[in-house]
């Protein structure tokens, strides 16, 4: 009996740990703030200017919401002259736990609203964690490539995560189905999942879209951190520590990192992206 109870305790602990780490827990906003737009975002009367012709759509990560995820980047983008829009996807108040293809459809609908309101031909997308990866499903399977100029992923889960070995441990214990019940997106972001295989089958990118990935060596959620990087003809992979060697920002802290903000602003100003190994 003691052994059985101990095994159950281990299983519950493993499920909770794998769930939280695989998902990329940010918990960057209180539930009360979940449906509040970040400062500078969702001003639906905003019209793009000749120097800032594309609206910027901000996409939060798993267990996050727009209010917390973009509390500091959104006002900087607005101050720089961008029309900024942000959304929550999935059930709330803490978002991003549901099925990723369904989230991508929500993003698709939101982009259509932004294009209609602003009169722009395309948007640029900036996303964190799942929010940097999920738009790739939109680009590949939901005709998003015709409506998006650039995707900037900040520590995105592009090839899934092994959560420092906990994903393998959870699978050995048969916990993947239980994790999916609580957080479908967490299970889908596990390295080697059916979702990840479908997303990356045939290549990481689609024609006509420019990609930027910003990763940090100190990512403790998307592991190894190199799994964020993409391969393709219009990709720029940027390691934060190549720009700021003493920057120790991890998976969630990058959202508030001024160096990351400057990289994002610079990438949005690029006309074209050259291939980068």
Image (cartoon, helix red, strand yellow):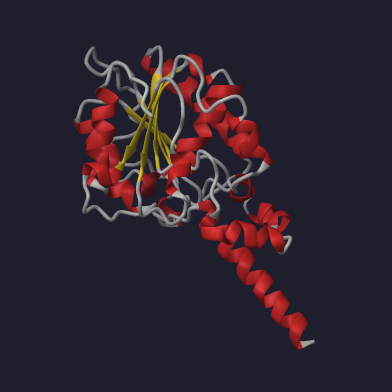
User: In the image, is residue 173 above or below residue 245?
Assistant: below
State which quarter of the image contains the N terminus: bottom right
In front here: 155 or 111? 155
Q: Position of residue 29 (x, y in %)?
A: 40, 54
Please tell me in which quadrant of the rendered image residue 246 appears.
bottom left
Q: How far across and down, in percent of the image, does residue 120 sit?
A: 37, 13
Q: Is residue 124 toward the left or the right of residue 162 in the image?
A: left
Quarter-wise, where is residue 176 in the image?
bottom right
Looking at the picture, does residue 112 appear above or below residue 79? above
Question: Picture quarter containing residue 46?
Answer: top left
Q: Residue at x 30, y 54 (%)?
A: 249
Residue that extends furthest to the bottom in the rendered view of this protein:
2
* Quarter of the figure that contains the C terminus: top left
Q: Is residue 217 depicted above or below 148 in this figure?
A: below
Q: Nearer the viewer, residue 26 or 18?
A: 18
In the image, residue 18 above or below residue 73: below
Residue 26 relative to residue 238: left or right: right
Left or right side of 227 for 3: right
Residue 214 pos. (x, y %):
35, 39
Q: Report the residue that reaches farthest toward the right.
A: 1
Q: How many marks?
A: 0
Q: Is residue 150 left or right of residue 198?
A: left
Residue 255 image position (x, y, % from top left):
33, 47
Kindly identify the residue that appears in the image at 61 percent across and 23 percent down. 141
């Amino acid at each position: 009996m003691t052994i059985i109870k101990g095994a159950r305790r281990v299983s519950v602990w493993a499920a909770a740990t794998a769930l939280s780490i695989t998902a990329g827990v940010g918990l960057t906003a209180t539930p009360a703030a979940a449906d509040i737009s970040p400062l500078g975002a969702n001003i639906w009367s905003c019209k793009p200017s000749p120097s800032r012709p594309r609206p910027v759509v901000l996409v939060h990560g798993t267990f996050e919401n727009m209010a917390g995820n973009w509390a500091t980047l959104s006002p900087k983008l607005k101050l720089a002259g961008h029309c900024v829009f942000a959304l929550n996807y999935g059930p709330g108040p803490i978002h991003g736990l549901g099925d990723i293809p369904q989230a991508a459809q929500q993003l698709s609908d939101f982009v259509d609203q932004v294009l209609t309101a602003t009169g722009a031909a395309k948007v640029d997308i900036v996303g964190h964690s799942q929010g940097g990866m999920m738009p790739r499903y939109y680009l590949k399977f939901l005709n998003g490539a015709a409506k998006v100029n650039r995707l900037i992923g900040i520590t995105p889960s592009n090839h899934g995560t092994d959560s420092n070995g906990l994903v393998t441990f959870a699978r050995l214990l048969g916990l993947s189905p239980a994790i999916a019940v609580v957080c479908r997106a967490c299970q889908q972001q596990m390295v080697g999942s059916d979702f990840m295989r479908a997303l990356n089958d045939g290549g990481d990118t689609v024609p006509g879209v420019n990609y930027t990935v910003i990763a940090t060596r100190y990512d403790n959620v998307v592991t190894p951190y190199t799994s964020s990087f993409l391969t393709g003809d219009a990709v720029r992979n940027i390691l934060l520590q190549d720009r700021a060697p003493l920057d120790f920002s991890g998976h969630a802290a990058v959202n508030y990192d001024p160096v990351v903000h400057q990289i994002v602003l610079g990438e949005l100003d690029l006309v074209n992206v050259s291939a980068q190994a």
